[in-house]
Image: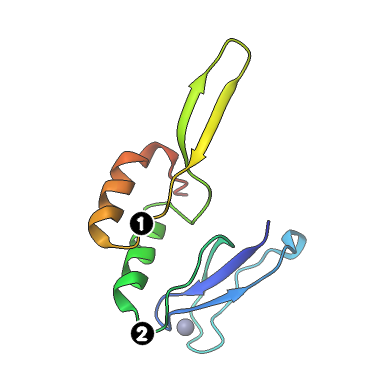
Amino acid sequence: MGYKNVCFDCRKAFNQGTDYENFRKTKCPKCGIIMKEVSQLFRPPKHNDIKKWEVAKYLMENGFLYQHVFEKIYKTEKAIVFEDYATYPENMRDAKEFVEKYKNRSILD
Ligand SMILES: [Zn+2]
């Protein structure tokens, strides 16, 4: 799976392919700040859809980089089962619920 680099100031996302060997901090070609690496599952909002960009930024600041988040995790006799991907929210109210609900799956570093 590949990844994307995102600049929240310019509201731009750049596909970076799957070259994890050369995984690197990349500067935004427009404003020069270090961009955030996120899963390629991230679907950038339209450039002028500032509210959706704010939601995406909020999620990422809380450790949700558009990686898969499973809704259900449970144990059976043989294995731990991961089921059903949660859908990433698109408005701030849902985003706050999402962060609260899945905070143990966040990947803050
Ligand atoms: Zn930028």
Three-letter amino acid code at the position of disc 1: Pro
Circle 2 residue: 48
Q: Residue furthest left?
A: 93
Q: Nearer the viewer, residue 13 or 29?
A: 13
Viewed as shown, does residue 101 lie left or right of 78?
left
Q: Secondary structure at mark 1?
A: loop
In the rendered image of this protein, does residue 4 appear above or below residue 96?
below
Q: Position of residue 33 (x, y in %)?
A: 48, 79
Is the N terminus in the top left, top right, bottom left or bottom right quadrant?
bottom right
Q: Quadrant of residue 55?
A: bottom left
The residue to which callout 1 is attached is 89
Q: Position of residue 81 (x, y in %)?
A: 56, 26
As helix, strand or loop, the secondary structure at mark 2 comes to: loop
- Residue at point 72% right, 59% down? 20
| In the image, residue 106 above or below residue 33 | above
**In the rendered image, which quarter is residue 106 located in?**
top left
Q: Is residue 86 left or right of residue 23?
A: left
Count the marks.
2
Against 21, residue 48 (above or below) is: below
Say which residue appears at 41% left-offset and 83% top-offset. Answer: 47
- In the image as oriented, which residue stretches furthest toward the top? 77
Residue 105 versus residue 44 in the image, above or below: above
Instruction: Mark 1: give few (<14), some (14-19) or many (20+) Cα within 10 Å.
Output: some
Residue 95: x percent and y percent? 30, 55
